[in-house]
Image: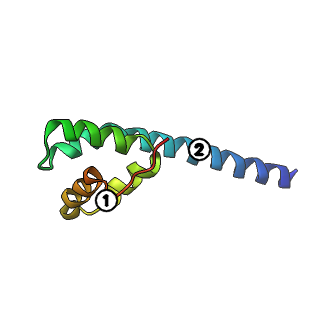
């Protein structure tokens, strides 16, 4: 019985972590455009970048992992095709 309870607890923790990650990812996706507004970009480039970044969770994680002082260079490299983002 103890083993069954331990396995159930582990399974519930994994489910809770997965749901929590999805909630955090969703909140981050909603903020991408606001973060892009802080950069020196044309509006159409912001729209394009927002679409590219939120299209895959790895892109969102990469975007938020870049230090603020490097984001301008990173988005310019994405726009120029020097950096390829994952597409779904």
- Front in this rendered view, residue 82 or 59: 82
- Helix, strand or loop for disc 2: helix
- Numbered-mark total: 2
The CA distance from mark 1 to mark 2 is: 37 Å
Q: Residues within 10 Å of mark 1 (few under 14, many from 20)?
A: few
Chain-order first, disc 1 or disc 2: 2
- Front in this rendered view, residue 16 or 25: 25
In the displayed structure, 24 sits above or below 64; it is above
Q: Position of residue 36 (x, y in %)?
A: 21, 45
Q: Position of residue 52 (x, y in %)?
A: 35, 42
**Residue ID at (57%, 48%):** 17
Q: Residues within 10 Å of mark 2 (few under 14, many from 20)?
A: few
Q: Is residue 28 visible?
A: no
Picture disc at residue 16: 2
Q: Which residue is mark 1?
A: 82
- Helix, strand or loop for disc 1: loop
Horizontal side of residue 22 vs 2, given as left or right: left
Q: Position of residue 14 (x, y in %)?
A: 64, 49
Give the colour scheme shown: rainbow
Q: Are marks 1 and 2 in contact (CB under 8 Å)?
A: no
Q: Closer to the camera: disc 1 or disc 2?
A: 1
Horizontal side of residue 24 vs 72, given as left or right: right
**Residue ID at (63%, 44%):** 15
Horizontal side of residue 46 vs 20, given as left or right: left
Q: Is residue 80 visible?
A: yes
Q: Position of residue 65 (x, y in %)?
A: 35, 60
Q: Residue furthest right?
A: 1
């Amino acid at each position: 019985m103890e083993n069954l309870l331990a396995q159930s607890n582990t399974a519930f923790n994994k489910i809770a972590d997965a749901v929590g990650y999805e909630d955090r990812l969703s909140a981050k996706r909603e903020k991408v455009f606001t973060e892009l507004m802080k950069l020196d970009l044309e509006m159409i480039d912001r729209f394009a970048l927002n679409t590219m970044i939120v299209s895959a969770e790895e892109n969102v994680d990469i975007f938020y992992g870049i230090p603020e002082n490097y984001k301008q260079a990173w988005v310019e490299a994405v726009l120029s095709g020097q950096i390829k983002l994952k597409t779904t």
